[in-house]
Image (tube, rainbow, N blue to C red):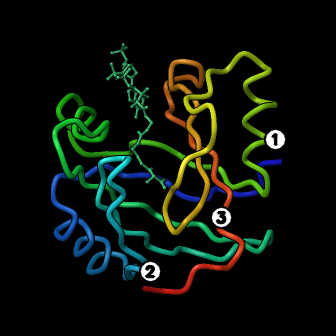
């Protein structure tokens, strides 16, 4: 069952400048940063609020780390902006199977590693009314700020 908006992914050309915009304009601070080589991104997670399912909602700022990155390709075509939305679930495997059974293309056979050791998969945007949609199960230990 999808229980929250886990994050909204925002593609940007310069992560440091974009982080500074969100800090100075809205007061949002960085909760976590990492490079995810498999996904081809450097990212900053800005925690917006805790949620009633024990999780949280973040803004995820994404900068590509190489030209092959899906985010680099997207930026070249669209410029900066909202890249995807991610729903949180306690069981990404079950939800991916259930949604796949409804005819929506699930992009990974098995969930992969996402931000803060979460397990993630994606749904094809062409099957989701133009929205690249991610499903996320957070790591069992609540992430510490770093
Ligand atoms: C592509 N399309 C999108 C889109 N990306 N539509 C809406 N939102 C997006 N983000 C559209 C294109 O405009 C195109 O439509 C069609 O989908 C095919 O796209 P393409 O540019 O030809 O590229 P493909 O087919 O090679 O790849 C698209 C696909 C890919 C969605 C399969 O981007 C993918 O696998 N994405 C999932 C992984 C990902 O994005 N990782 C980065 C975030 P037209 O009409 O022109 O044919 S990593 C992340 O978020 C992790 C770290 C985390 O949350 O923890």
> Closer to the N terminus: mark 3 or mark 2?
2
Image location of residue 121, percent across then percent down: 59, 41
Residue marked by disc 1:
94
Question: Residue at the location (63% across, 38% down)?
Answer: 110
C-alpha distance separating marks 1 and 3: 14 Å
Secondary structure type for disc 3: loop
Q: Reply above or below: 49 against 8.
A: below
Secondary structure type for disc 2: strand
Relative horizontal placement of residue 111, taking residue 90 as reference (left or right): left
- The single residue placed furthest to the top in the displayed view is 103
Secondary structure type for disc 1: helix
Packing grade of label 3 (10 A; few <14, some 14-19, many >=20) is many
Residue toward you, 115 or 25: 115
Residue marked by disc 3:
138
> Closer to the N terminus: mark 1 or mark 2?
2
C-alpha distance separating marks 1 and 2: 28 Å
Residue marked by disc 2:
31
């Amino acid at each position: 069952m999808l229980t929250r908006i886990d994050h909204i992914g925002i593609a940007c050309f310069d992560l440091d400048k974009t982080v500074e915009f969100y800090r100075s304009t809205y007061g949002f601070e960085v909760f976590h940063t990492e490079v995810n080589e498999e996904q081809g991104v450097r990212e900053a997670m800005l925690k917006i609020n805790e949620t009633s399912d024990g999780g949280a909602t973040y803004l995820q700022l994404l900068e590509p780390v190489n030209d092959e990155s899906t985010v680099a390709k997207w930026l070249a075509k669209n410029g900066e902006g909202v890249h995807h939305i991610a729903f949180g679930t306690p069981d990404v495997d079950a939800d991916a199977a259930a949604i796949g059974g409804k005819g929506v293309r699930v992009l990974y056979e098995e969930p992969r590693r996402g931000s803060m050791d979460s397990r993630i998969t994606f749904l094809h945007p062409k099957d989701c009314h133009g929205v690249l949609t991610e499903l996320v199960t957070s790591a069992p230990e609540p992430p510490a700020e770093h």
